[in-house]
Image (cartoon, coloured by chain):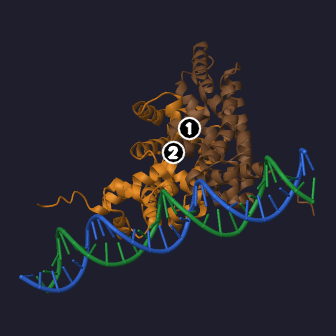
Chain colours: A brown, B orange, C blue, D green
DNA sequence: ATTTTTGTTAACCATTTGGTTAAACTATAT
DNA sequence: ATATAGTTTAACCAAATGGTTAACAAAAAT
């Protein structure tokens, strides 16, 4: 009988690790959990990935490094302010629908060791530069397109309204008596609701 | 020589536990860390609080149970919509300035075990009832005071803009190149900025 | 003053957990 | 067929960690 090598063990492990790390965090995740989830022996983890730290870093950076630059690109694009806001919200929510634990995961790790984290996510070249977006807001104020608002607060509001519901998902679902489908729907709506809300708030 | 019983050991332990749990989460916190922080022997932890779970629960529920009902009270008060929004933002930000790790802590634990958590925070009597606030929004829409907005999104926006910056504090500080004092100042400003932003967005 | 209760500690124990090893199995090249 | 390199596992190990114990000290009760 030919053994079905259903998927490279390496990939199976990475997928399992991703799942376990995401839902329990680095400290809470057990190597055995990951092995079980991947249905392989614990020793294989160490065969493919030297130790827990290495495995974690791989999973984590893999997730974050492919996502953050995308966001960065949007903020630094040449689009108009309103369009940029819409792009950000849409892109972010789409990504989160597929990877709903990422924001919590990021918050978790950023909290564990902020410096380490930031350094690893954004290599020197990929540092987040909110500067352009903030300046753009100021420019629009001068042009008279939008009200006099503090750019920092506007940015915080945008990020908050987009990201927070995912971070707080279990709480939101519970307190607003939703199920997963309804949550997904609500977030889908927010792609239009958030930009509308912001524009209503700042347009002259 | 009289030994200075500088503070009841019990309190010292609770304060230490609070600090350690808050910054490392339940899984990451070590009993020894807590003992060190409180400058007592590890065995004393077990003398006063049977085990880690009990200690954690006490700290955690202590923090959360005294805070959440306050928020609930605001949402269910008889104040006008705009005033209620302002009250919530102010109260929440004030509380967080003193206890900045609480929101992350709550998110963390809510994620670990949503059902258990929710059950413990809000005893049967203290369940959060967003209902009244949501109805109030609908009433105001009918009265014509505010635009037609989806009450759920409005509530989410309010919560997001208020809570998120604290959850993401390390990230915000880092990316906007702030220090703690500046962060505090920004949050102080938000007490007025958020209500203003919301009102601008929804007032007819 | 003496006994009892309460508070505190160092040393210890059991379990969990990350990590290793040596042997076995599989596939491929020779 | 046999050797070889890569893959997988069971069994094991050492360190970390939550928790216990027994002895001791301080305070309170008698």
* Image location (x, y in percent) of residue A178: 68, 56
Residue at 59% from the left image edge and 47% from the top image edge: A53
Q: Which residue is mark 1?
A: A117
Q: Is residue A38 above or below residue D25?
A: above
Using the numbered discs, state the Cα–Cα distance from disc 2 to disc 1 in whole angstroms: 8 Å
* Image location (x, y in percent) of residue B106: 52, 53
Decide if residue A177 is on the left or right side of residue A185: left
- Disc 1 residue crowd, few under 14, some 14–19, many 20+, Cα 10 Å: some
Q: Earlier in the sequence, mark 2 or mark 1?
A: 2
Residue at 60% from the left image edge and 42% from the top image edge: A106
* Image location (x, y in percent) of residue A119: 56, 32
**Nearer the observer, B120 or A141:** B120
Q: Which residue is mark 2?
A: A112
**Residue B203 visible within the image:** no
Placement of the C terminus of chain A among the 4 image quadrants? top right
Placement of the N terminus of chain A among the 4 image quadrants? bottom right
Decide if residue A133 is on the left or right side of residue A77: left
* Image location (x, y in percent) of residue B113: 59, 60
Element under label 1?
A: helix
- Report in which chain the residue with disc 2 lies: A
Decide if residue A21 is on the left or right side of residue C29: left
**Nearer the observer, D4 or B197:** D4
- Disc 2 residue crowd, few under 14, some 14–19, many 20+, Cα 10 Å: some
Decide if residue B84 is on the left or right side of residue A106: left
Element under label 2?
A: helix
- Report in which chain the residue with disc 1 lies: A
> Residue B183 is drawn in which quadrant?
top left
> Residue A23 is drawn in which quadrant?
bottom right
CB of mark 2 within 8 Å of CB of mark 1? Answer: yes
**Residue B94 visible within the image:** yes
Residue at 52% from the left image edge and 65% from the top image edge: B120
């Amino acid at each position: 009988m030919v053994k079905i090598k259903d998927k490279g063990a390496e990939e199976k492990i990475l997928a399992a690790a991703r799942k376990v790390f995401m839902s329990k965090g680095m400290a809470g995740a057990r190597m055995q959990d990951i092995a079980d989830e991947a249905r392989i022996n614990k020793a294989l983890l160490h065969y493919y990935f030297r130790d827990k730290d290495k495995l974690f870093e791989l999973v984590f950076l893999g997730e974050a490094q492919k996502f953050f630059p995308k966001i960065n690109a949007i903020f630094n694009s040449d689009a108009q302010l309103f369009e940029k806001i819409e792009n950000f919200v849409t892109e972010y929510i789409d990504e989160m629908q597929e990877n709903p634990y990422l924001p919590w995961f990021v918050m978790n790790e950023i909290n564990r060791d902020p410096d380490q984290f930031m350094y690893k996510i954004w290599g020197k070249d990929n540092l987040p530069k909110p500067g352009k977006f903030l300046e753009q807001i100021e420019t629009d104020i001068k042009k008279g397109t939008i009200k006099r608002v503090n750019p920092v607060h506007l940015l915080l509001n945008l990020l908050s309204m987009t990201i927070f519901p995912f971070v707080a998902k279990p709480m939101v679902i519970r307190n607003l008596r939703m199920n997963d489908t309804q949550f997904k729907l609500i977030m889908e709506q927010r792609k239009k609701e958030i930009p509308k809300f912001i524009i209503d708030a700042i347009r002259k």
